[in-house]
Image: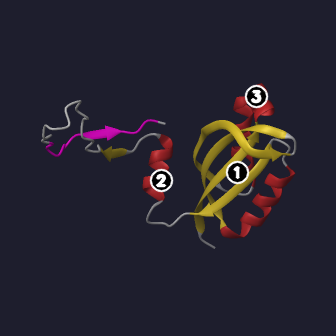
Amino acid sequence: MAETVYECMFIFNANAYARNPAGAANNIEELVKSLGGEVLANRLFDERKLAYPINGHRKGVYWLTYARLESTSITKFNRACQLNDMILRHMVVKIDPRLVDAMVSVAQGKAVLPARDIPKIDDDLDEEIDIEPSTEEAVVEG
């Protein structure tokens, strides 16, 4: 069966992550490799207060992973995530093959996106602002 690319969002226990930040990345990589998959991108997304307590935890660390796995192994992957004490919640989404390269490159911090044309705000509102389109490119860093 063909391998599919999945986007996985994890919420880690903030206390466990603070004690061993490298352990979170290694934990996910080992889990994916044990199921015969490949990690394409693995990075910290954000650390924030949770909207509601999960198992008594009020803070969580959001972790983003892109992985290539067999579609038949997703059930095992979900079960392993549920049994992992460091993972409070997780979500796995299948990525459209047309979007894989762009999404993975953005997650790795390698994407080059066109810069947005944002008008400058003037104190004098009576003046007209002439804005010419920019051809510059901005690099997104992760």
Task: Measure how far apart labels 3 and 2 are at the Cα level.
Answer: 27 Å
Q: Nearer the viewer, residue 121 or 1?
A: 121
Residue at the disc numbered 3: 20
Residue 33 badge = 1
Q: Judge left or right: residue 39 versus residue 51.
A: left
Amino acid bearing label 2 = Met
| Amino acid of disc 1 | Lys
Mark 3 is surrounded, within 10 Å at the Cα level, by few (under 14), some (14 to 19) or many (20 or more) other residues, namely few
**Crowd around label 1: few <14 · some 14–19 · many ≥20 (10 Å):** some
The stretch of residues the image draws in magenta is 131-141
List x then y, in percent, for residue 70. 66, 65
Q: Percent from the top left, x then y, of residue 5?
A: 57, 61
Q: Which mark is residue 89?
A: none
Helix, strand or loop at disc 3?
Answer: loop
Q: Main secondary structure of the magenta part?
A: loop
Q: Earlier in the sequence, mark 2 or mark 1?
A: 1
* Residue appearing at x 76%, y 28% in the figure: 20
Q: Amino acid at mark 3?
A: Asn
Q: Nearer the viewer, mark 1 or mark 3?
A: 3
Quarter where residue 94 is shown:
bottom right
Residue in view at x 54 percent, y 63 percent = 95
| SS class, disc 2 | helix
